[in-house]
Image: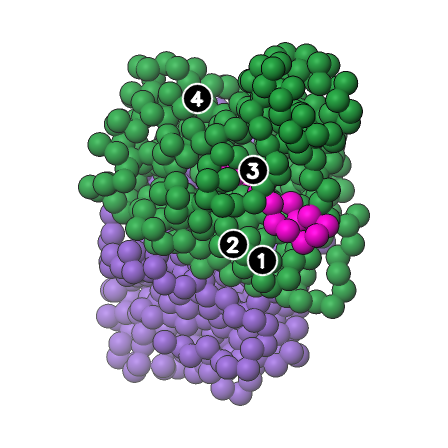
Chain colours: A green, B purple
Amino acid sequence: MRGSTPSFLPIGPGGIIGILGGGQLGRMLSLAAAKLGLRTHVYSDKADAPALDVATLRTIAPFDDKGALTKFARSCDAITFEFENVPSAAVAFLAHEKPTHPDARALAVTQDRFAEKTFLSDLGIGTAEFARADTFAEARGALSHIGAPSILKTRHLGYDGKGQAKIVADGDLASALQALREAPAILESLVDFAFECSVVAARAIDGSFIAYDPPENLHTDHILRRSQVPARLTPAQGAQAQAIAKQIADALDYVGVLAVEFFLTKSSALLVNEIAPRVHNSGHWTIEACVVSQFEQHIRAVAGWPLGDPSRHSDAVMDNLIGADAENWRSLAGGTGALHLYGKRDIRPGLKMGHVTRLSPLGAAKPIPRD
Amino acid sequence: MRGSTPSFLPIGPGGIIGILGGGQLGRMLSLAAAKLGLRTHVYSDKADAPALDVATLRTIAPFDDKGALTKFARSCDAITFEFENVPSAAVAFLAHEKPTHPDARALAVTQDRFAEKTFLSDLGIGTAEFARADTFAEARGALSHIGAPSILKTRHLGYDGKGQAKIVADGDLASALQALREAPAILESLVDFAFECSVVAARAIDGSFIAYDPPENLHTDHILRRSQVPARLTPAQGAQAQAIAKQIADALDYVGVLAVEFFLTKSSALLVNEIAPRVHNSGHWTIEACVVSQFEQHIRAVAGWPLGDPSRHSDAVMDNLIGADAENWRSLAGGTGALHLYGKRDIRPGLKMGHVTRLSPLGAAKPIPRD
C-alpha cells in the first residue's frame, strides 16, 4: 500500500512518524512532531545520533537490515527520511508497509546529479550546461562541448563535500577524473553567479503547495555558512523561484518539504543548482521567523495534515556553527539570537554543530551586514 | 551539595537535566532543552505522561521511591520540577545529590497559601485580605474580621480546581468548611477586579533577572482560557508588576522561571493572587512571540546559563484547548495560529490538551477581541 492513496490519514495526536536517519534534521523534525502531539520513531545506523535523544521510539540498525526495517515500519503510521543519502532500497522497502514520503522517485531523481539535471531540463527549467561524463570518452566529449572553466561532479552523493573537481583548462580533465576515482560523473559549466538563493517549499498529499520567502545563501568550502531573508531578489525573481519550486514539486507528485537551490547569474537569470528532497539548512530561520517552521510543514505533509502558513513576521539571518564554532557556546549563549545546538557528542571540522538565528523587524531600513 | 554553590555549572551540550513530573510543562521544557543541545531525564509517576515521549531518559516510579530518586539524581547534571505539587520531600532529597532548582524553600512557600500570603505581606506586597482558618474557631474569627463575600481555600494544593468555596453570607461558613473536608484553610476577601494579569520571569544563579511583558489572563471555571499581550496595563502598572515579581524572586533567592498572578482591582491596585514556582500557562505565548521562550529561560537558569532576551517581536493571544476543544484538532490544524498539542492519550473534561497562539504585529491598531 503506497502513500499516494493513504487510507488512514490524517494521523491524529499520539500517532507515530517514522524518521529514517538520526542527524540534526531528524532531531528538529522530531521536535516539530512533538509540538503537534505526534510521536516519532527514529531509525539510525549510528548509536549516538542527535535525533535519538528526542525520539519516543529508537531503532539502531544498518539501513539494509530488513528485519529491523520491517519492525520499524510496523510501529509507524507514516514514514519519512531526513537526508537523501539514505539508501533508496530502504525507502522502497518501507513504502510497501506504510505511507512513505517523499517517495522513491523523488529520491532517485535527486540522488543522481545527471538524472536531476535531465529532469530539470525536460521541464524547461534553466540549469548550468551539463553533460554526462561516466567514462573518460564521455568526459572528453562533454568538455569539448561545454568547455572550461567547468566542474566535474560525481553523479551520486555521499561524498561529504568531496566529489567535485574544478577544470580550469582542458588538460585538467584526467586529474579531475582521478580525483573522483572514476565514479560516474557529470560535467557542468561553471556559473558566474551574483549570489546563491533557495526556495524551501512544501507540498501536501492533496497537491496543495506553500513556499517560504527565498533566503540568500552564502557558502564557504561548499558548506552553507549563512542564510538571510529577504534575499536581494526582485519580487518578480522571488516569485519566479517559488514558481520553479512548485513546478518541480508538481512534476514529482512530491509530498513533504523540498529545497531548490538557485544561482542568480550576473545577467539576472535564475538557474537551479540542485534539489534537496528534505528539510534544508537554508530553511532553519523559519523556526523563529514564521509561525509554522519547515520542520512542522514536513511533518504536516507526511502526516496528511493541511500545510501551515509560510509567511514570516520578521527578517532573519541564520549563521551555521561549524566545527570549532561550537566551542564558543558559552559566549553564544550570552549573545542575542536564537541558539540551536544539536547535541553532537564530538566537535569535528566541517561538522554542523548548531546554528544561530537573529531576527529583525520586517523591512527594517538597515541591511544586515554579511559578517 | 546544594545548587546555590554549584561546582560544575554551566552544564554544557550533552548534559542531562532531570525533570520531576511528566506533564505538558515537562514536555515543553524537554523540547527547549533539546534546542540547546541538552538532554532530559523525565521522572514521572504515570507511565503515559506526555513528557516521556520526548525525554532521552525516562523513570516511571512513585515520587517517594528513594531508590528510583537516587538513581535518577545520579544520572542528571541538574534537576528541576515541572509542577509545584510534587512532594517537597522528593525535592529536598534530590537536592542532596545534585543542584536542584527552584529549591525546597520556594516550594514550601508556594505550596501553602497561608505561608505564601504571609511571605508576600511581610514583603509589603499587596494581596487580598487573608487570615488563617485551620479550625472552625479560626475560620469564624477570620470571617468576622474579613467579612463576606470571601473565599475559603485549602492551604495546600493538589485538589485539581477543587479546594475553594465562596462565602456569600456568614451562614455559609459551615458548609464551606465541609466542602473543603475540614482541610487546613485560609480565608481571603473576594477581590472585585477589573481583570487578571501575570508576570512570567526568570532569575539566574548569579541573581540576574528578566521578566516578560505581562499578559492579561481570562479564566473560566478556575481554568486559564486565554492570555494576551499586551495587557490593558499602563506602562507604570506593567513595570510595577515586573518589580513585584523581581522582589519576590530576590527574596526567595529563586533560580528558574516563576509566575506571579495578579488582580488589577477596579481602583487600579495590583494585588498578588498567587505565585507559581515554575513555567506557567500564561507564558506559553513566549514560544512564538519571543526569541527565547519561558521554557528555554527555565532550562538556562537551571543549567547555569545566562538568561536570554525576553523582549517580544509580536503581540500575541494564546487560547487553551481544554477537554473536548481538542476534538477539533483537524480544523485547528487548518486554521491560522501556532497549534500545540500535548500528546495526551485521553480527552477528559477540564484537562489541558493543547493551546493555540496567534501573533499580530506589535502595537497593531486593532485590538484582538476576547472571543
Residue type at numbered disc 4? Pro
Q: Are marks 3 and 1 on the same chain?
A: yes
Q: Secondary structure at mark 1?
A: helix
Residue type at numbered disc 2? Gln
Residue type at numbered disc 3? Glu
Sequence-wise, which precedes: disc 4 or disc 2?
4
Q: Position of residue A295 (x, y in %)?
A: 47, 45
Pinpoint the chain carrying mark 3. A
Disc 3 target residue: A274
- Up the image or down, B233 lies above or below B57; here it is below
Disc 1 target residue: A238
Q: CA distance from mark 1 to mark 2?
A: 6 Å
Q: Secondary structure at mark 2?
A: helix
Q: Is residue B135 visible?
A: no
Disc 4 target residue: A87
Disc 1 + disc 2, Cβ < 8 Å:
yes
Residue at (46%, 40%) from the top-left corner? A122
Sequence-wise, which precedes: disc 3 or disc 1?
1
Q: Residues within 10 Å of mark 4 (few under 14, many from 20)?
A: some
Sequence-wise, which precedes: disc 4 or disc 1?
4
User: Closer to us: mark 4 or mark 2?
Assistant: 2
Q: Residues in magenta?
A: A263-280
Q: Residues within 10 Å of mark 3 (few under 14, many from 20)?
A: some
Pinpoint the chain carrying mark 1. A
Q: Are marks 4 and 2 on the same chain?
A: yes
- Up the image or down, B291 lies above or below B79; here it is below
- Up the image or down, B27 lies above or below A234; here it is above
Task: State left or right for residue B206 relative to residue B67.
Answer: right
Q: Is residue A370 magenta?
A: no
Disc 2 target residue: A242
Residue type at numbered disc 1? Gly
